[in-house]
Image (cartoon, helix red, strand yellow):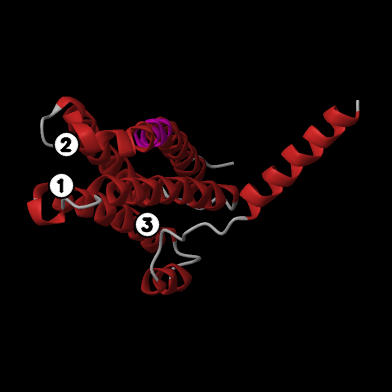
């Protein structure tokens, strides 16, 4: 019984250390400032997050195409893909927040959906290199993260398509109410 109690305490302490460990912010200081400036404007904020996510994927592609960046490339690609996934999660949180306040986000949502389709293609092309002679060995460093990124984008894309349909139906209903006399 005492051994079990000690084991439980050790697991709880280890969990506390892991959860309290500082996480690297996926945004630079300049990006954080841009996010603050667009906090209440979905038409500027959502495309901004997409821009940041697109930049992370562009950096992955640049890093993978430059042989001079081969040293520790797998770890750096891992970190960029992790940042990308956190930005996709942030995008979803922002969409949820704007939706809770009944904001009409049809226009930026169309941009988000278009970008997420692009992201799926790029992520799948990264995954397709797992058996490549050049990238196959380092792929192990980011295999889990690229799968997580693909799952995050796919789930978010599905949710955003449904939300766009709902927003379109709501807008049509509002328009119809305005046109129909009481």
Q: Disc 1 to disc 2, how far (Cα)?
A: 8 Å
Judged left or right of residue 113, residue 133 is left
Instruction: Give coordinates of residue 11: x percent, y percent.
Output: 73, 38
What residue is disc 1 on? 64
Q: Earlier in the sequence, mark 2 or mark 3?
A: 3
Left or right: 126, with 154 as reference point: left
- Tell me which secondary structure the magenta stretch mostly adopts: helix
Distance of label 2 from label 3 (alpha carbons): 28 Å
Residue 153 belongs to magenta span: yes
Looking at the rendered image, the disc whose residue lies closer to the viewer, 2 or 3, is: 2
Q: Position of residue 109 (x, y in %)?
A: 37, 46
Identify the residue under disc 2: 135
Expressed as whole percent of the image width and height from the top left, the position of residue 43 reads 38, 59
Q: Mark 1 touching mark 2, by CB under 8 A?
A: yes
**Residue 152 lies within the magenta run:** yes
Q: Is residue 149 visible?
A: yes
Please report the bounds of the magenta region as a residue range: 148-155
Q: Secondary structure at mark 2?
A: loop
Q: Residue furthest front?
A: 3
Earlier sequence position, callout 1 versus callout 3: 3
Q: Are marks 1 and 3 in contact (CB under 8 Å)?
A: no
- Residue underneath mark 3: 49
């Amino acid at each position: 019984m005492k051994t079990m109690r000690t084991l439980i305490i050790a697991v709880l302490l280890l969990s506390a250390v892991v959860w309290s460990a500082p996480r690297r912010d996926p945004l630079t200081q300049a990006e954080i400032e841009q996010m603050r400036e667009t906090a209440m404007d979905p038409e500027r904020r959502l495309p901004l997050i997409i821009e940041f996510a697109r930049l992370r994927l562009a950096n992955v592609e640049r890093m993978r195409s430059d042989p001079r960046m081969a040293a520790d490339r797998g770890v750096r690609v891992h970190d960029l893909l992790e940042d990308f996934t956190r930005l996709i999660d942030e995008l979803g949180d922002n969409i949820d927040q704007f939706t809770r306040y009944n904001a009409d986000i049809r226009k930026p949502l169309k941009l988000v959906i278009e970008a997420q389709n692009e992201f799926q293609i790029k992520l799948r092309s990264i995954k397709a290199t797992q058996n490549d002679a050049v990238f196959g060995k380092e792929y192990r460093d980011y295999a889990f993260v690229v799968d997580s990124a693909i799952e995050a984008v796919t789930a978010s894309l599905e949710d955003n398509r449904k939300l766009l349909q709902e927003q379109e139906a709501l807008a049509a209903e509002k328009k119809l109410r305005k046109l129909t006399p009481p």
